[in-house]
Amino acid sequence: MLSIVVHSIDALPQAAQQFIDHMGDARVFAFYGNMGAGKTTFIKALCECLGVTDTVTSPTFAIVNEYEGRQPVYHFDFYRIRRIEEAYDLGFEEYCYSGHLCFIEWPELIEDLLPGDAVRVTIETLDDGGRRITMN
């Protein structure tokens, strides 16, 4: 387990690199947190550290964004799906088993589709406005 506390946006690159250093061979990361906790912001910082050359934005309406860099990165946001079949329709399982990194926001809506080795990441808002990022 890894726990990182971030007190300012300026500390995000260092936190992202620390996270990357602990990712190991895992490919699928499920990000849990309330609306506004910073899931997209942290994923953007991760992508920047991973050398993604595309602009990283929330895939809320597209459901999945594919980014290019040193390696492909798939970024999902399942906030707007209404049925798990929508995830099947976009080929979610193919992405998960592609061997490329998958960062998933709102995974609770597709929990049954997550691979057994998916890493759960929780982002909590602290009383002082900082964030605690926990990787399980």
Image (cartoon, rainbow, N blue to C red):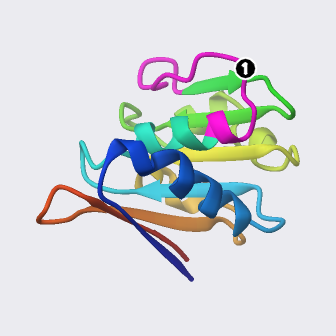
The span shown in magenta is 47-63
Is residue 69 among what the camera can see? yes
Q: Position of residue 60 (x, y in %)?
A: 42, 25
Q: Is residue 17 left or right of residue 110?
A: right
Question: Does 79 lie within the magenta span?
Answer: no
**Identity of the residue drawn at 13% across and 62% down:** 128
Is residue 106 among what the camera can see? no
**Identity of the residue drawn at 36% across and 31% down:** 80
Q: Secondary structure at mark 1?
A: loop
**Identity of the residue drawn at 88% across and 48% down:** 99
Question: Does 54 lie within the magenta span?
Answer: yes
Relative to 4, does residue 41 appear above or below in the rendering?
above
**Residue type beneath disc 1:** Thr
Q: Position of residue 52 (x, y in %)?
A: 72, 28
Relative to 109, does residue 78 appear above or below in the rendering?
above
Residue 118 vs residue 92, the one in the foreground: 118
Q: Give the main secondary structure, helix, strand or loop, of the magenta stretch.
A: loop
In the image, farthest residue toward the left: 127
- Other residues around mark 1 within 10 Å, as few (<14) / some (14–19) / many (≥20): few
Q: Position of residue 67 (x, y in %)?
A: 71, 24
Q: Quadrant of residue 79?
A: top left
The quarter of the picture where the C terminus appears is bottom right
Q: Is residue 79 left or right of residue 34?
A: right
Residue 68 vs residue 9, the one in the foreground: 9
In the image, farthest residue toward the front: 10
Q: Is residue 73 left or right of residue 39?
A: right
Residue at label 1?
53
Q: Position of residue 91 (x, y in %)?
A: 72, 33
Relative to 29, does residue 127 appear above or below in the rendering?
below
